[in-house]
Amino acid sequence: MVVDSASASDRLLHPDEAREKIFERLRQLPAQEVALRDAPWRVLARDVVAAEDHPPFPAATMDGYAVIADDPSPWREIVGRQTAGYVDEIDVTLGTAAWITTGSPVPRGATAVVPVEVTELADEHVIIHQDHVEAGANIRPVGIDLAKGASILRAGDVLGPPEMGLLAAMGVDPVSVVRRPRVSVLSTGNELVEPGETPGPGQIRDSNRFSLIAALQEAGAEVIWDGRGADDLDALRMSLITRVAESDVVITSGGVSMGDLDLIKPLLSELADVHFRRVFMKPGKPFNFATSGDALIFSLPGNPVSALVSFEVFLRPALRSMLGAKEIDRPQVQVRIAHAVQPSDRIEFQRAVVAVTPDGSLEARTTGSQASSRLASLIGANALVVIPPGTDRLAAGSRVDALLVAPIASGTR
Ligand code: AMP
Ligand code: MG
């Protein structure tokens, strides 16, 4: 179905408007239960409330002796021994103490734990070399780490190490997470061969598919299919129809420019509703967004850097949003450019290394030639520096925005 007239969908959109058009059509994916063991880095689908107190019993935080805090006895009889994981019938009274280990329940009657380091053993007795023992010393009261009923995690939280640990501590297994977007990746181009093949005359290896598979994994998506197609209208049509039917998201690369063999463009008009085709940015000006039923179709330009920058600017936030993640965007910071930059006629996303200078400010240094075919310009880059369009050179030291795509390099170079 052709919905937009050619002129409407060919309009050059500001990246913000393009993003809006994408976000209007996103929906959060449903929840699914997974074993906690399989949940790292997934997005939590529901708020989690502590079902129990943690610790569930008053627990010793030191190896030592459980005593009554204000017991004036010069020495105490050892009436029991208790290690973590056991509960013995021990009563601590005036003049007595129980030897206990870190993490073990504090025996009945005891109000403090004296560390073993300040004690001395004499026969079956212990002498405490500490003037004053505070009530509650070295005891973790019930629920001090987590009180029953407290909200611990929220829908949208990403399950990293502490989140995983908390869920385990609270017995949340299986856990309800948002289903990952099912994504198909199709590289198009007659010139493409597999990485394991030796390119013939005029051929190159397909690199976009592999860049995109990594980018998708990092974004939390599931690649359910990936492949390569020649610039053949019938074959691409069949491939697109199949992928659209089984995927939440279909990503193609190549075939969206102005050439006779740029077949993705006409095929999208034939098979889907096209929402826009061009964005006012560099690299990544040809970028088609279409929908067909519930499937979203993103057709990226073939140039390897253009494909990845388009992914970073539009697809990653879209996928994070489908996942219901709390944070969908990369952090945006202000940086000073280390060298003068000649702006282009479009908003330019330049690949750079952002580092902290000795005076504590952030400085961006280019990764070299910014040609849209030069994948090496992304190697080591931790930022996309946003250069506004213009004609006047931006002097070294000018302030611009940057998207941090990886942690900031520390120290000076
Ligand atoms: P296209 O967008 O199809 O006009 O391709 C633009 C440029 O990107 C051409 O130089 C293609 O050879 C190259 N290219 C297209 N697809 C890929 C790919 N999957 N991997 C590497 N280079 C590609
Ligand atoms: Mg092509």
Image (tube, rainbow, N blue to C red):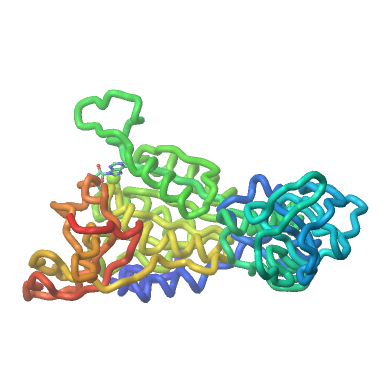
Q: Residue at (70%, 68%) from the top-left corner?
A: 133
Q: For residue 92, which quarter of the picture?
A: bottom right
**Count of numbered circles on the image:** 0
Q: Residue at (25%, 66%) from the top-left corner?
A: 281
- Please tell me which residue lies in front, 348 or 365: 365
- Please tell me which residue lies in front, 327 or 288: 327
As drawn, 308 above or below 227: below
Where on the image, by quarter, is ligand 2?
top left
Left or right of 229, for residue 319: right
Does residue 181 appear anywhere in the picture? no
Q: Residue at (68%, 70%) from the top-left corner?
A: 132
Measured as percent of width and height from the top left, residue 310 is found at 34, 59
Q: For residue 350, which quarter of the picture?
A: bottom left
Left or right of 181, for residue 75: right
- Please tell me which residue lies in front, 82 or 114: 114
Q: Residue at (50%, 60%) from the top-left corner?
A: 319
Left or right of 78, for residue 303: left
As drawn, 283 above or below 259: below
Does residue 355 appear anywhere in the picture? yes
Measured as percent of width and height from the top left, residue 134 is found at 70, 71
